[in-house]
Amino acid sequence: MFVLNQKLKNLKEALKVWNKNIFGNVHSQVDNAYKELDDIQVKIHSLGYSNVLMDQEKAAQLNLESALNIEEVFSHEKSKVKWHCEGDRNTAFFHIVAKIKRTSSLISTMKNGEITLTDPNLISEHVVNHFTNIFTNNPNITQTGMIEEVITNLITERINNMLTMLPSYEEISNAVFSLNSDSAPWLDGFGAIFFKITGK
């Protein structure tokens, strides 16, 4: 364990050097790529298009796209690290994320004809009534077979009969004797071993 610990420390130092000298600051790379592209486009605007400037602009755009991709991956990985460290605990970060999700999924207003609903109770009542009227009071759905067209029937009558058929004694016996004898007892206080012994 001591050798492993020393190797991990050496790796950490090497990664710090690599991050500083090779990978660099991803945000600075994006800023530099934007500046390079802007400088080339200023030259094109003042001097006019030329093959050299067009090639430089294309190369600068590719460089900017690469820098943005690196920044996106970096931010994504950083957010995962923060979530793994603080997301599953009762921290301020967890409550901020939960509040953002709750706010973004909240329906605060809804139009009902010319009326704008803002009361949550009225909004929920309107939604329930809307879909209730569609699926209960609309004869086109039941008479024209619209439900059958939208929701494909995957269960045939033969399969349905087989699924709803009561299990035989042999099937019940096979299921019981396939249970783990050392499993914890259920709510009734009896484990699988009890049913195996009494079922013999």
Image (cartoon, grey):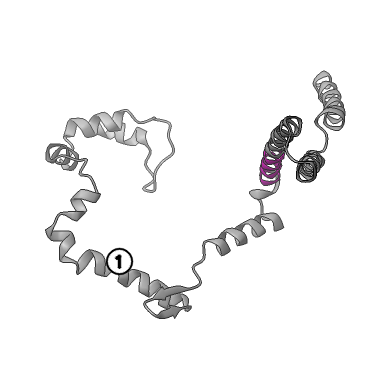
| Residue 96 image position (x, y, % from top left) | 66, 59
| Residue 30 image position (x, y, % from top left) | 77, 41
Q: Is residue 166 above or below residue 19?
A: below
| Residue 50 image position (x, y, % from top left) | 74, 34
In the rendered image, is residue 61 in sight? yes
Q: Quadrant of residue 166?
A: top left
At label 1, the amino acid type is: Phe
At label 1, counting other C-alpha atoms closer than 10 Å, the crowd grade (few under 14, some 14-19, many 20 or more) is few
Mark 1 sits on what residue? Answer: 131
Q: Quadrant of residue 169?
A: top left
Describe residue 62's horizontal placement relative to residue 131 as left or right: right
Quarter of the image with the N terminus in it: top right
In the rendered image, is residue 197 in sight? no
Name the outermost residue toward the top.
3
> Is residue 176 within the magenta segment?
no
> Is residue 76 within the magenta segment?
yes
- Residue drawn where x is 31% and y is 70% of the image: 130
Query: Which segment is the magenta one?
Result: 71-84
Which of these two is toward me, 99 or 26? 26
